[in-house]
Image (cartoon, grey):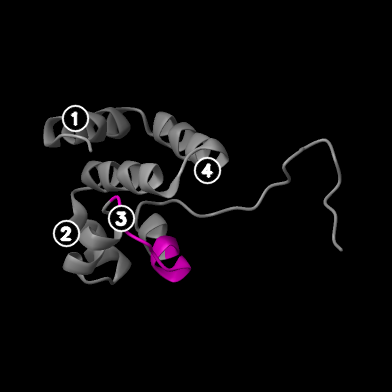
Amino acid sequence: MTSRLHDEAMAELYRNDPTLALDVINSILEDGDQAELLTVLRQLAQAFGGVQAVAEQAHLNPTQLYRTLSPKGNPALSSLAAILKAMGLRLAVQPLDPSAPARVA
């Protein structure tokens, strides 16, 4: 579990370098686990004014958002999309191999 000071330092880093935040999230989506993703999203929420502010913009209950972004959280797709949208982000689907055409079975 990360410490509060680490979370604050990461939030400041993401605030100063939003591209880094995107790279970290995309890397986690490729190789990481859900708890790791939720930790980064919580840190990113801090960078966007805190969980309370993100909850307000996402039209979510702040208490529920704290739980959702905990390492054991399990956000619904609609909640995840709302959280990302509040931070100016969105989910996207990409082929595993960008040089290969998408397969539909």
Q: Secondary structure at mark 3?
A: loop
Location of residue 96 in the rendering, given as x and y in whole percent from the top left corner: 72, 42
Q: CA distance from mark 2 to mark 4?
A: 25 Å
Task: Tell me the tag on residue 97.
Answer: none
Q: Position of residue 26 (x, y in %)?
A: 52, 39
Q: Earlier in the sequence, mark 1 or mark 2?
A: 1
Image quadrant in which you'd find residue 37: top left
Q: Which residue is mark 1?
A: 6
Which residue occupies 26% across, 53% down? 70
In this view, the mark in front (3 or 4): 3
Q: Mark 4 is on which residue type?
A: Leu
- Residue denoted by label 2: 52
Total count of labels: 4
In magenta, the rendered stretch is 71-81
Residue type (three-letter) at the residue carrying disc 1: His
* Distance from Cα at disc 1 to Cα at disc 4: 21 Å
Q: Quadrant of residue 76?
A: bottom left
Judging by the rendered image, the residue that carries numbered circle 3 is 72
Q: Where in the figure is residue 48, as x and y percent of width and height?
A: 25, 46
Left or right: 3, with 88 as reference point: left
* Nearer-the-camera pick, 65 or 47: 65
Foreground label between 2 and 4 = 4
Which three-letter amino acid code belongs to the residue tagged 2?
Gln
* Residue located beneath label 4 in the image: 29
Q: Dot 3: few (<14), some (14–19), or many (≥20) neighbours within 10 Å?
A: few
Indicate the amino acid at tag 3.
Lys
